[in-house]
Amino acid sequence: MVSKRLISFQTSRFCVLPLLLLFSFCYAASQDLASFEKNLTVHVLDNGWTFIILERPVAPVFSFATQVDVGSAQEVPGITGLAHMFEHMAFKGTPNIGTSDYEAEKAALLELEAAYEAYQNEKSRLNPDPDEVERLLAVFKDKQTAARKFVVNGDFHEIIDREGGVGVNAGTSSDYTRYFYSLPANKLELFCFLESERFLHPVFREFYEERDVVQEERRFRVESNAFGRLFEQLKFVAISAHPYRHPLGGYMSDLQSFTIEDARVFFHKHYVPSNIVTAVVGDVQAGELISLLEKYFGRIPAGDKPPPVRTEEPRQIAEKRLVLREKAQPVYVEAYHMTAATHSDQPVFDVIDDILSSGRTSRLYRKLVRDQRSAVQVGSYSNYPGAKYPGLWLVLAIPARGVANETIADEIRLEIERIKTELVSDEDLTKAKTRARANLIRSLGSNQGLANQLVAYQTLYGDWRELFRQLNSLEKVSKEDVRRVAEKTFTDSNRTVATIVTESEGGGADE
């Protein structure tokens, strides 16, 4: 077991100091990490689960975030969508939560899975017997009904609500899956019980019903949404090899075929303690909490951390283009391959984003939205679809009525060319750094924001202190750095262009 006092700071000041003083305090503190050691503890259980405990007694509440180092990038063909699927299943309960009779339910679930396997095997045969497929489907449906009788719907959420919990939620990205909510300070043991329970022995109840829900989410977010289709296709075109190209919610064929056993294998591979980080922030005492963590989370067996993704994206050698003709408003997107967030150039991309599109004084907003009124929205974004591996830098614009995508493209290229060929002004560079610092500090203004950032940086960098070191890195960005990174990144051969062209009712395109 490793238990180490690390870094702390007077976070109670976050609620009372003006913003400028607040980020000045944090920036100064980033230069002297030792001054933070009083209130933050990192504790690693014998099984490998890392906990970050920040004592912040501003109010009698605490928030937590648990980040599992698995997202769609860790999936493989045939089971895409399982990372998101398990996020759903993590709220379905355990042998002690969500069931009226677990022993009977367990037997019913075994019969259900056997029935589904028989149905799927017949359905997947080269020449399936239609009558047999229908018969086996009916058996499967009957087993679903039998298993459903033991389910206590919403039991997990109801316990949290009843005990004063708020903000219960979770999210899946290409890089990670995160779970979070807040509770009163006197519910610390409840938190330890609930969260350890669902990762000790989750029950995959209502799996196929929830799989249908996930399919419906895909239909809503992607298949019936022009914007969703554009961004999914953009990944397919721009990313040729790396698993970042996987659809976040999975391919529909996978969502219609993966099984409880597939989910169980995925869970046991990725939801091991050495692959999980939890931050607890608020009115807690590290000594008391550590005893509870040992008691509850210490029950979970250790496991080997999954191997890293092997495939690297090859260098793009030619411009790629994608055109979707839709009965929807036009959209223009340019994407360029960029480095991972852990690369030393990440702060430079943050500055470029700010100068080009952050706020009403940014270059693209002033030109396209304010002055020319040729676009109604414009923005640039780093690290799409993820930050852990090299991904994409994007610039997106929605043209105003009657303005062609080509017009928007010309103006965006002019501004990108300026970044490549001219040194940015001292004023622009200073503003970008100031806004970036302010954005970071705003994210640290609440228990939940702090917990989210701590687990994100601990997972990504292996050291949560990098959260504050980023301020130092940002301060060191020079005008020459901005031009250097722009020249390297914004080349024709590194570019993928994706557009929506509005299709008229008659079937033609309104160019």
Image (cartoon, rainbow, N blue to C red):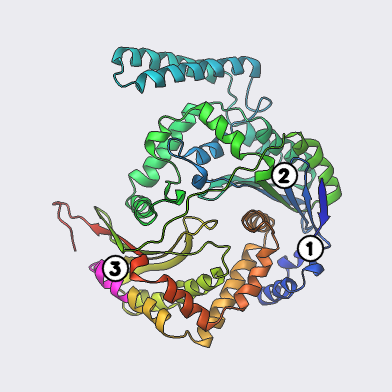
Q: Amino acid at mark 3?
A: Ala
| Label 3 Cα neighbours within 10 Å, binned few <14 / some 14-19 / many ≥20 | many
Q: Residue at x 60, y 74 (%)?
A: 474
Q: Secondary structure at mark 1?
A: loop
Mark 3 vs mark 2: in front: 2
Q: Which residue is mark 2?
A: 49
Residue 100 location in percent, x, y? 64, 20
Residue 439 location in percent, x, y? 59, 68
> To which quarter of the image does residue 126 belong?
top left
Q: N-terminal of the two: label 1 or label 3?
A: 1
Q: Amino acid at mark 2?
A: Trp
Q: Secondary structure at mark 3?
A: loop
Residue 364 location in percent, x, y? 39, 75
Q: N-terminal of the two: label 3 or label 2?
A: 2
Q: Which mark is residue 8?
A: 1
Mark 2 vs mark 1: in front: 2
Q: Which residue is mark 3?
A: 400
Screen quadrant of the N terminus: top right
Is residue 279 toward the left or the right of residue 482 in the image?
right
| Label 2 Cα neighbours within 10 Å, binned few <14 / some 14-19 / many ≥20 | many
Q: Residue at x 52, y 83 (%)?
A: 479
Q: N-terminal of the two: label 2 or label 1?
A: 1
In magenta, the rendered stretch is 401-411
Q: Is residue 367 above or below residue 323?
A: below
